Image: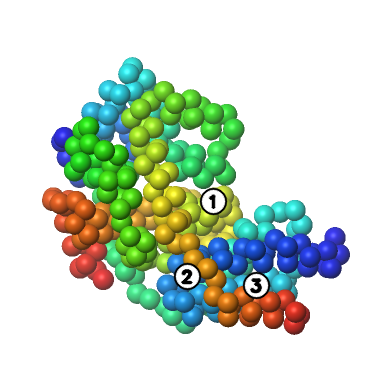
Amino acid sequence: MRKPPRKKARVSPRKAPARKGLMSLCGGMSAAECEKALEHIYEFINSCDLKADLGAEIKRHLDSCRGCFTRFEFEQKLVARLKEAGCCSCPETLKARVLTILKEF
Amino acid sequence: MDNDARRKEFQSKALPLLNEVYGVALRMTRNPQAAEDLVSEAYARAWKALDQFTPGTNIRAWLYRIMTNAYINHFRKKHREPEKVSLDAYDRIEDFHLFNRVSSEAGPGSPDPFDSVVGRLTNEKFEKALGRLPDEYRAAVILYDLEGLSYQEVADALQVPLGTVRSRLARGRKILQSALWSQAVEAGLVKGNGRGKEALSHAKASS
Protein backbone atom coordinates (compact mmCIF):
# COMPACT_ATOMS: atom_id res chain seq x y z
CA MET A 1 0.00 0.00 0.00
CA ARG A 2 1.22 3.43 -0.88
CA LYS A 3 2.50 5.62 1.91
CA PRO A 4 0.49 8.77 2.63
CA PRO A 5 2.10 12.01 1.48
CA ARG A 6 3.69 14.24 4.08
CA LYS A 7 1.90 17.46 3.47
CA LYS A 8 -1.73 17.02 4.23
CA ALA A 9 -3.23 19.59 6.51
CA ARG A 10 -6.76 18.48 7.22
CA VAL A 11 -9.24 15.70 6.79
CA SER A 12 -10.39 15.70 3.23
CA PRO A 13 -11.06 12.32 1.67
CA ARG A 14 -11.53 13.99 -1.69
CA LYS A 15 -8.08 15.55 -1.68
CA ALA A 16 -6.25 12.96 0.33
CA PRO A 17 -4.51 10.36 -1.82
CA ALA A 18 -3.84 8.27 1.29
CA ARG A 19 -7.53 7.51 1.54
CA LYS A 20 -8.09 6.59 -2.09
CA GLY A 21 -7.80 2.90 -1.51
CA LEU A 22 -10.29 2.95 1.28
CA MET A 23 -12.59 5.41 -0.40
CA SER A 24 -13.61 2.74 -2.85
CA LEU A 25 -15.07 0.88 0.11
CA CYS A 26 -17.65 3.61 0.37
CA GLY A 27 -19.25 2.19 -2.73
CA GLY A 28 -20.46 5.32 -4.44
CA MET A 29 -20.98 7.27 -1.23
CA SER A 30 -20.19 10.92 -1.73
CA ALA A 31 -16.81 12.15 -0.59
CA ALA A 32 -18.50 15.11 1.09
CA GLU A 33 -20.35 12.73 3.41
CA CYS A 34 -17.09 11.03 4.37
CA GLU A 35 -15.46 14.38 4.96
CA LYS A 36 -18.28 15.53 7.22
CA ALA A 37 -18.30 12.29 9.21
CA LEU A 38 -14.53 12.33 9.74
CA GLU A 39 -14.52 16.01 10.64
CA HIS A 40 -16.90 15.32 13.53
CA ILE A 41 -15.59 11.91 14.50
CA TYR A 42 -14.21 12.92 17.92
CA GLU A 43 -17.39 14.83 18.72
CA PHE A 44 -19.30 11.71 17.76
CA ILE A 45 -17.16 9.64 20.15
CA ASN A 46 -17.45 12.24 22.92
CA SER A 47 -21.18 12.76 22.18
CA CYS A 48 -21.38 16.04 24.16
CA ASP A 49 -21.21 18.55 21.38
CA LEU A 50 -23.10 16.98 18.53
CA LYS A 51 -26.66 18.01 17.78
CA ALA A 52 -28.95 15.00 17.59
CA ASP A 53 -29.64 15.28 13.86
CA LEU A 54 -25.96 15.56 12.95
CA GLY A 55 -25.18 12.62 15.26
CA ALA A 56 -27.85 10.54 13.53
CA GLU A 57 -26.53 11.55 10.12
CA ILE A 58 -23.01 10.50 11.05
CA LYS A 59 -24.25 7.24 12.52
CA ARG A 60 -26.11 6.46 9.28
CA HIS A 61 -22.98 7.22 7.31
CA LEU A 62 -20.77 5.05 9.51
CA ASP A 63 -23.26 2.20 9.19
CA SER A 64 -22.92 2.26 5.43
CA CYS A 65 -19.32 3.39 4.82
CA ARG A 66 -16.71 0.82 5.71
CA GLY A 67 -13.77 3.18 5.16
CA CYS A 68 -15.05 5.75 7.64
CA PHE A 69 -16.27 3.10 10.05
CA THR A 70 -12.78 1.55 10.16
CA ARG A 71 -11.31 4.93 11.12
CA PHE A 72 -14.03 5.59 13.65
CA GLU A 73 -13.50 2.19 15.25
CA PHE A 74 -9.75 2.76 15.44
CA GLU A 75 -10.13 6.16 17.14
CA GLN A 76 -12.80 4.84 19.48
CA LYS A 77 -10.59 1.93 20.55
CA LEU A 78 -7.67 4.32 21.01
CA VAL A 79 -9.68 6.55 23.35
CA ALA A 80 -10.90 3.51 25.31
CA ARG A 81 -7.36 2.12 25.61
CA LEU A 82 -6.00 5.49 26.75
CA LYS A 83 -8.68 5.70 29.42
CA GLU A 84 -7.92 2.18 30.57
CA ALA A 85 -4.16 2.83 30.69
CA GLY A 86 -4.70 5.69 33.15
CA CYS A 87 -7.05 3.86 35.50
CA CYS A 88 -5.65 3.97 38.97
CA SER A 89 -6.76 3.90 42.55
CA CYS A 90 -6.55 6.99 44.63
CA PRO A 91 -4.09 6.37 47.51
CA GLU A 92 -5.62 5.78 50.94
CA THR A 93 -3.66 8.74 52.31
CA LEU A 94 -5.42 11.04 49.84
CA LYS A 95 -8.85 9.61 50.66
CA ALA A 96 -8.15 10.32 54.32
CA ARG A 97 -6.97 13.86 53.51
CA VAL A 98 -10.10 14.64 51.53
CA LEU A 99 -12.40 13.21 54.19
CA THR A 100 -10.64 15.36 56.78
CA ILE A 101 -11.17 18.45 54.61
CA LEU A 102 -14.87 17.66 54.36
CA LYS A 103 -15.13 17.38 58.15
CA GLU A 104 -13.10 20.46 58.96
CA PHE A 105 -14.98 23.17 57.16
CA MET B 1 -31.18 24.49 48.07
CA ASP B 2 -29.63 25.03 51.49
CA ASN B 3 -26.04 24.34 52.36
CA ASP B 4 -26.76 21.04 54.10
CA ALA B 5 -28.42 19.70 51.00
CA ARG B 6 -25.50 20.92 48.87
CA ARG B 7 -23.05 19.23 51.20
CA LYS B 8 -24.97 15.98 50.97
CA GLU B 9 -25.04 16.20 47.18
CA PHE B 10 -21.30 16.90 47.12
CA GLN B 11 -20.54 14.00 49.44
CA SER B 12 -22.68 11.57 47.49
CA LYS B 13 -21.55 12.67 44.03
CA ALA B 14 -18.03 14.10 44.32
CA LEU B 15 -16.50 11.62 46.74
CA PRO B 16 -17.06 8.60 44.46
CA LEU B 17 -15.14 10.51 41.76
CA LEU B 18 -11.91 10.49 43.80
CA ASN B 19 -10.21 7.69 41.84
CA GLU B 20 -11.06 9.27 38.53
CA VAL B 21 -10.12 12.80 39.60
CA TYR B 22 -6.83 11.50 41.01
CA GLY B 23 -6.15 9.75 37.68
CA VAL B 24 -6.61 13.01 35.80
CA ALA B 25 -4.46 14.91 38.33
CA LEU B 26 -1.74 12.30 37.98
CA ARG B 27 -1.75 12.68 34.22
CA MET B 28 -1.69 16.46 34.48
CA THR B 29 1.10 16.71 37.03
CA ARG B 30 2.92 13.44 36.19
CA ASN B 31 3.96 13.26 39.80
CA PRO B 32 2.08 11.27 42.50
CA GLN B 33 2.78 13.70 45.34
CA ALA B 34 1.83 16.74 43.26
CA ALA B 35 -1.31 14.90 42.12
CA GLU B 36 -2.33 14.24 45.74
CA ASP B 37 -1.75 17.88 46.65
CA LEU B 38 -3.71 19.05 43.62
CA VAL B 39 -6.70 16.78 44.32
CA SER B 40 -6.93 17.71 47.98
CA GLU B 41 -6.66 21.38 47.09
CA ALA B 42 -9.42 20.98 44.47
CA TYR B 43 -11.75 19.25 46.93
CA ALA B 44 -11.00 21.85 49.59
CA ARG B 45 -11.71 24.72 47.17
CA ALA B 46 -14.89 23.05 45.92
CA TRP B 47 -16.10 22.34 49.44
CA LYS B 48 -15.54 25.94 50.49
CA ALA B 49 -17.23 27.29 47.37
CA LEU B 50 -20.22 24.98 47.50
CA ASP B 51 -22.64 27.91 47.49
CA GLN B 52 -21.45 28.65 43.95
CA PHE B 53 -22.40 25.22 42.72
CA THR B 54 -25.70 25.03 40.88
CA PRO B 55 -27.39 21.83 42.02
CA GLY B 56 -28.31 19.48 39.24
CA THR B 57 -25.50 20.70 36.97
CA ASN B 58 -22.49 18.59 36.08
CA ILE B 59 -20.52 18.20 39.30
CA ARG B 60 -17.64 16.42 37.51
CA ALA B 61 -17.15 19.34 35.12
CA TRP B 62 -17.33 21.78 38.03
CA LEU B 63 -14.74 19.82 40.01
CA TYR B 64 -12.44 19.57 36.98
CA ARG B 65 -12.78 23.30 36.42
CA ILE B 66 -11.74 24.02 39.99
CA MET B 67 -8.88 21.54 39.80
CA THR B 68 -7.62 22.82 36.45
CA ASN B 69 -7.78 26.41 37.69
CA ALA B 70 -5.79 25.40 40.76
CA TYR B 71 -3.32 23.62 38.52
CA ILE B 72 -2.88 26.53 36.12
CA ASN B 73 -2.73 29.26 38.74
CA HIS B 74 -0.79 27.58 41.44
CA PHE B 75 0.92 24.35 40.57
CA ARG B 76 2.25 25.28 37.18
CA LYS B 77 3.94 28.36 38.56
CA LYS B 78 5.78 26.19 41.06
CA HIS B 79 6.72 23.32 38.80
CA ARG B 80 7.01 25.13 35.53
CA GLU B 81 8.43 22.99 32.77
CA PRO B 82 9.86 24.11 29.47
CA GLU B 83 7.96 23.24 26.29
CA LYS B 84 8.69 19.61 25.51
CA VAL B 85 8.26 19.56 21.79
CA SER B 86 8.68 21.80 18.83
CA LEU B 87 5.02 22.32 18.00
CA ASP B 88 5.28 23.61 14.46
CA ALA B 89 6.70 20.31 13.33
CA TYR B 90 3.43 18.65 14.26
CA ASP B 91 1.29 20.88 12.08
CA ARG B 92 2.63 18.99 9.07
CA ILE B 93 1.25 15.75 10.43
CA GLU B 94 -2.06 14.71 8.92
CA ASP B 95 -5.21 13.82 10.83
CA PHE B 96 -5.62 10.11 11.65
CA HIS B 97 -1.83 9.88 11.63
CA LEU B 98 -1.64 6.73 13.71
CA PHE B 99 -4.35 4.95 11.75
CA ASN B 100 -2.64 5.83 8.47
CA ARG B 101 0.79 4.75 9.68
CA VAL B 102 -0.38 1.49 11.23
CA SER B 103 -2.61 0.60 8.27
CA SER B 104 0.07 1.29 5.70
CA GLU B 105 2.60 -0.76 7.64
CA ALA B 106 0.21 -3.65 8.09
CA GLY B 107 -0.96 -3.69 4.47
CA PRO B 108 -4.39 -4.62 3.21
CA GLY B 109 -6.06 -7.77 4.45
CA SER B 110 -4.04 -7.90 7.67
CA PRO B 111 -5.65 -8.29 11.10
CA ASP B 112 -7.24 -5.32 12.83
CA PRO B 113 -4.63 -2.52 12.76
CA PHE B 114 -5.54 -1.41 16.25
CA ASP B 115 -5.41 -4.78 17.99
CA SER B 116 -2.23 -5.91 16.24
CA VAL B 117 -0.18 -2.80 17.08
CA VAL B 118 -1.67 -0.10 19.30
CA GLY B 119 -3.61 -2.51 21.49
CA ARG B 120 -0.35 -4.27 22.35
CA LEU B 121 1.37 -1.19 23.77
CA THR B 122 1.75 -1.31 27.54
CA ASN B 123 0.13 1.20 29.89
CA GLU B 124 3.57 2.67 30.48
CA LYS B 125 3.99 3.39 26.77
CA PHE B 126 0.64 5.16 26.67
CA GLU B 127 1.63 7.29 29.64
CA LYS B 128 4.98 8.10 28.03
CA ALA B 129 3.21 9.18 24.84
CA LEU B 130 0.79 11.38 26.80
CA GLY B 131 3.80 12.84 28.57
CA ARG B 132 5.09 14.14 25.23
CA LEU B 133 2.26 16.65 25.11
CA PRO B 134 2.80 20.14 26.50
CA ASP B 135 0.65 20.60 29.64
CA GLU B 136 -2.14 22.67 28.13
CA TYR B 137 -2.55 20.31 25.18
CA ARG B 138 -2.51 17.28 27.43
CA ALA B 139 -5.15 18.84 29.68
CA ALA B 140 -7.43 19.54 26.69
CA VAL B 141 -7.11 15.99 25.34
CA ILE B 142 -7.64 14.43 28.78
CA LEU B 143 -10.70 16.52 29.58
CA TYR B 144 -12.40 16.30 26.18
CA ASP B 145 -11.39 12.98 24.64
CA LEU B 146 -10.88 10.92 27.76
CA GLU B 147 -13.18 12.46 30.36
CA GLY B 148 -15.93 13.40 27.93
CA LEU B 149 -16.40 17.02 28.95
CA SER B 150 -17.98 19.37 26.39
CA TYR B 151 -16.01 22.03 24.49
CA GLN B 152 -17.54 24.70 26.72
CA GLU B 153 -16.67 22.83 29.91
CA VAL B 154 -13.06 22.39 28.75
CA ALA B 155 -12.92 26.07 27.78
CA ASP B 156 -14.13 27.04 31.28
CA ALA B 157 -11.67 24.67 32.93
CA LEU B 158 -8.68 25.88 30.94
CA GLN B 159 -9.82 29.53 30.89
CA VAL B 160 -9.40 29.84 27.14
CA PRO B 161 -11.82 30.55 24.27
CA LEU B 162 -13.64 27.71 22.48
CA GLY B 163 -11.50 28.14 19.36
CA THR B 164 -8.38 27.60 21.42
CA VAL B 165 -9.83 24.39 22.85
CA ARG B 166 -10.49 23.09 19.34
CA SER B 167 -7.03 23.96 18.08
CA ARG B 168 -5.34 22.48 21.15
CA LEU B 169 -7.33 19.29 20.69
CA ALA B 170 -6.44 19.03 17.01
CA ARG B 171 -2.76 19.63 17.67
CA GLY B 172 -2.73 17.59 20.86
CA ARG B 173 -4.13 14.54 19.05
CA LYS B 174 -1.46 14.85 16.37
CA ILE B 175 1.33 15.06 18.92
CA LEU B 176 -0.14 12.14 20.85
CA GLN B 177 -0.61 9.97 17.77
CA SER B 178 2.87 10.72 16.55
CA ALA B 179 4.28 9.88 20.00
CA LEU B 180 2.30 6.63 20.10
CA TRP B 181 3.74 5.67 16.75
CA SER B 182 7.23 6.32 18.12
CA GLN B 183 6.40 4.15 21.13
CA ALA B 184 5.23 1.35 18.81
CA VAL B 185 8.50 1.63 16.88
CA GLU B 186 10.53 1.57 20.09
CA ALA B 187 8.60 -1.45 21.31
CA GLY B 188 9.42 -3.24 18.05
CA LEU B 189 5.74 -3.64 17.14
CA VAL B 190 6.30 -1.92 13.79
CA LYS B 191 9.33 -1.39 11.61
CA GLY B 192 8.92 2.36 11.54
CA ASN B 193 10.54 3.28 8.29
CA GLY B 194 10.34 6.71 6.70
CA ARG B 195 8.21 9.22 8.54
CA GLY B 196 8.00 7.19 11.69
CA LYS B 197 11.70 7.62 12.32
CA GLU B 198 11.43 11.29 11.56
CA ALA B 199 8.68 11.81 14.11
CA LEU B 200 10.75 9.93 16.66
CA SER B 201 13.84 12.03 16.07
CA HIS B 202 11.75 15.19 16.36
CA ALA B 203 10.50 14.09 19.72
CA LYS B 204 13.97 13.12 20.89
CA ALA B 205 15.71 16.21 19.59
CA SER B 206 13.44 18.53 21.48
CA SER B 207 13.31 16.68 24.79
Q: Are marks 1 and 2 in contact (CB under 8 Å)?
A: no
Which of the two discs, 1 and 3, labels the residue nearer the N terminus? 3
- Residue drawn at point x = 55 percent, y = 38 percent: A50
Q: Amino acid at mark 3?
A: Tyr
Residue B189 showing in the rendered view:
yes
In the rendered view, tell whether residue A65 sits above or below residue A18. Answer: above
> What residue is disc 3 on?
B43
Q: Amino acid at mark 1?
A: Gly
- Residue drawn at point x = 58 percent, y = 73 percent: B39
The chain that hosts pointer 3 is B
Secondary structure under the numbered disc 3 in the rendered image: helix
Q: CA distance from mark 3 to mark 2?
A: 15 Å
The chain that hosts pointer 2 is B
> What residue is disc 1 on?
B148
Horizontal and vertical percent position of residue B68: 55, 67
Which of the two discs, 1 and 2, labels the residue nearer the N terminus? 2
Horizontal and vertical percent position of residue B119: 33, 50
Mark 1 and mark 3 on one chain = yes
> What residue is disc 2 on?
B26
Secondary structure under the numbered disc 1 in the rendered image: loop
Mark 3 and mark 2 on one chain = yes
The one of B117 and B176 positioned closer to us in this rendering? B117
